[in-house]
Amino acid sequence: MEEHNSVYRILDASFNRASEGLRTLEEAGRFALNHSELASEFKELRHGLASSMEALPRAELIRSRDTTSDVGTEIQAGSEYRRQSIESVVIAAASRVQQSMRVLEEYMKVIDAEPARKLERIRYRIYTACANLELKVRSNQIQQRLADSHLYLLLDAADSDLEFERRMTDLIDSGVDIVQLRDRSVSDRTLLRRARIGVRIARDAGKLFIVNDRADLALAADADGVHVGQEELPAIDARRILGSDRIIGVSTHSLEEAKQAVADGADYIGCGPVFPSHTKAFKHFVGVDMLREVAAMIQIPSFAIGGIDSSKLEQIIDSGFYRVAVSNAVHAAPHPMKTANEIKQVLEEAASRLSPTSKVV
């Protein structure tokens, strides 16, 4: 009798835990994403779970409930009270649901094999639904972070993992929104190792990390996306490699190239070189005229790049831009973190005046 009651107690607790988790996921699909298919899928799974549990006498489940003597209520991790974003809520809820479903299935076998088989089928559907929701939420979070970004910084691989980590941390702390790893002088393995460091630091801070040119390394490092030039992998093909939930950025040197990048599915563009640069040699500079054209015609986030430093920000902003990509302006400054922070503040003030009020959900 005591074992029977213990099984019912486990089933009751796991059912409640799974139901609460499914409802949490359903609300993310419904209200955070406005995604009717995902919301409907989790609602259907929630009802399917409840239906499977009807094989058990509800009164017996309730009688087995004993929250006051549940030792598990006193075992809590500090992370349970910290959620950085909707994505972190979804990840935690999905894990809770999947674990609870396995517990339900196993202990239901003690009572009745048929509902256990139903729970198994539901569990497999939940795996797929949770993966789809997490990818969609992550994609939306990335797009929102991109929309909110103003200062984009190009970074080389540094001399060591430790030095790269230090520089990444300093840049993120100074207000940089996006870091792009760009270095053709090191091996693929070094790039991959540095990229994984950058991804971890940027993600912990709610910022973005992009790999230049190499969609394969971006995917392997789980970076937020890749940036390609006019002579590199086309955006359409980069999308085939990275899928729909990551960012594709494209360098553009004319309004026509900017329009083509949008047509090819780019999430953002770099526009330039606006001025002569210390880091890359060009025969032609687009100046602020192209920026004015892009600001008037292109809706996706657009970053001015090429020879931009604090002294040129006013020209950039007057053209309608409030996003810039820089390298030497920060790295060669006497106080790089202070300079990055000052540039970011100027851009944010300009964005408050110039940017549309719409947000990505």
Image (spheres, rainbow, N blue to C red):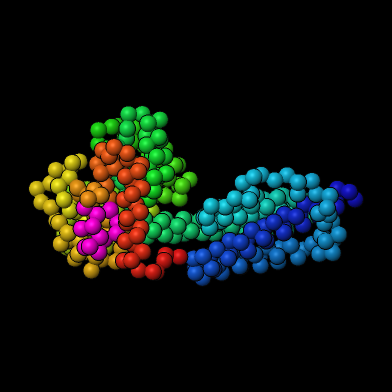
Residue lying at the far right in this picture: please name it.
1
In the drawing, does residue 293 fall left or right of residue 339? left
317 part of magenta stretch: yes
Q: Position of residue 28 (x, y in %)?
A: 55, 63
- Left or right relative to 285: residue 268: right
Residue at horizontal 56 percent and vertical 56 percent from the top = 90
Query: x, y (%) of residue 82?
Result: 59, 50
Vertical placement of residue 198 versus 59, above or below: above
Q: Nearer the viewer, residue 206 or 32?
A: 206
In this rendering, the answer to whether 10 lies above or below 291 is above
Give the residue drawn at x 63%, y 55%: 97
Image side of residue 165 versus residue 40, left or right: left
Which contiguous range is marked in magenta?
312-324
- Give the number of marks: 0
Q: Could you tell me which residue is drawn at 17 percent across and 53 percent down?
A: 274
Residue 241 visible in the snapshot: no
Residue 263 picture location, percent across and down: 25, 64
Res 121 → quadrant: bottom right
- Between 147 and 307, the one nearer to me in the picture: 307
Where residue 265 sits, quadrant-wise, is bottom left
On whether residue 257 falls in the magenta region, the answer is no
Nearest the viewer among 78 and 192 is 78
Residue 56 x %, y %? 79, 62
Residue located at (10% from left, 51% from top): 284
